Amino acid sequence: MLSVYEGFFSGGARIVHSDVLLGLVEGGRQHHQVLSIHGEVHREATRQRMEDDACYRALTAGGVPVTSLGRSAGLVDGTVAARAFSGPELAATARAMAGADVILSLKEQPLALLNQAGLPRRPVVVCLHRSDPENQGPALDELRTAIADGTVVACVCCAESTRDAYLAAGIPAALLHVIPNGVDLLRFRPDAEARQRVRGSLGIPAAAPVVVFAARYAAMKNVPLLLRAARLWLGREGGGHVLMCGAGMTPENPALWADIEVAFGAERALAERVHLLGVRRDMAAVHAAADVVALTSSAGEAAPLSLIEGMMCGAVPVTTDVGDSAAIVAGHGFVTPPDPGAVALAWSGAVAGHADLAPALAHSRERFSRTRMIAAYATLLDRVTRRPASRHEEPQQSP
């Protein structure tokens, strides 16, 4: 099977998909390879080269071959500007497709390549990870085109909100299969040693309350709301700290600095307790260091990986009501309106209620298991490869 990525850049969808591929090749059950359209992408004030990416390194170390068309581009609002594919690029794509029984498209953007005339016809499974298909540039039209010509045989939705959004956009219900995101429970777990190590490296006392915000610097993540809430919370919690991780969450990002200036103004001492960590390769350890995992997104989210990872490491989730976030944290944390005061109060409530919520977080671990996610993908892909897809088949949901 061949997976086509738009590129290797920081984001939950790439982490989930790459982890699925590694699970599917374990034990030789399936053979997978990856074709990346871009070799590097400039996004969120960060140059992200394929070879530097943690997902690329994990895939190649796990025996999954990765090739690239070698494009380099900047992204605007998460979308690469359209550019015609050259003859050599189409020839390289055709070679990569030739030995595949099924093509997996990571999100709908790679369909701009897969819909090109002259490429081999293969059944395509599109993996959808957003809840706002209308805000993906021309990608939704590319998906509709691929469905109309019979190329797309299934769409994997990582959340119920994804399925609902694409159904509302006119995608046939029979093509939409919900497989919720999962994580490696051996990696994402409470870890006292990692908690102490990360806190120590940042000069944070063992007893200090800590909020982690793991997200790329993008409009949909509503970073200004996060920072306004942080100012209020840090003013109330004398020893509190906020850790911001992800692409663009660095001192080198002028837009982030501008947001910090607006949110904190002259309160420099409070701003010093906001730690800009950028892209981290040890997110399990960072989450283990947290008491709260925060999400302030305004749109686009489906099943946010940061919430799941943080919860599995023992952090209490506090989120705005976007995508499936409310369902994910139900009984384990707090859902807030997009108001900085409400968010700050919820963080304090999460810190105070951490011990009481710990049993519920521990009890929910199996629900978010990577093993269950991979098994559901394997079942769907086996069905796709064994027989033609039926437009009238009932949509499936993983257990």
Image (tube, rainbow, N blue to C red):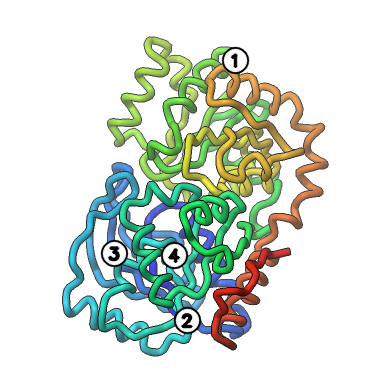
Q: Position of residue 186 (x, y in %)?
A: 69, 59
Q: Give SS at disc 2.
A: loop
Numbered disc in front, either 2 or 1: 2
Between the C-alphas of marks 3 and 2, the distance is 21 Å
Question: In the visual, does 203 lie left or right of 209?
Answer: left
Residue occupied by mark 3: 38
Q: Are marks 4 and 1 in contact (CB under 8 Å)?
A: no
Q: 67 and 225: which one is in front?
A: 225
Kindly tell me whether residue 253 is visible in this rendering. yes
Q: Position of residue 346 (x, y in %)?
A: 65, 24
Between the C-alphas of marks 1 and 3, the distance is 45 Å
Q: Quadrant of the C terminus?
A: bottom right
Q: Amino acid at mark 2?
A: Val
Residue occupied by mark 2: 102
Q: Give SS at disc 1.
A: loop
Q: Are marks 3 and 2 in contact (CB under 8 Å)?
A: no
Disc 2 packing (10 Å; few <14; some 14–19; many ≥20): many
Q: Amino acid at mark 3?
A: His
Image vertical order of residue 309 relative to residue 257, above or below: below
Q: Amino acid at mark 1?
A: Gly
Kindly tell me whether residue 305 is visible in this rendering. no
N-terminal-most mark, 4 or 1: 4
Residue occupied by mark 4: 106
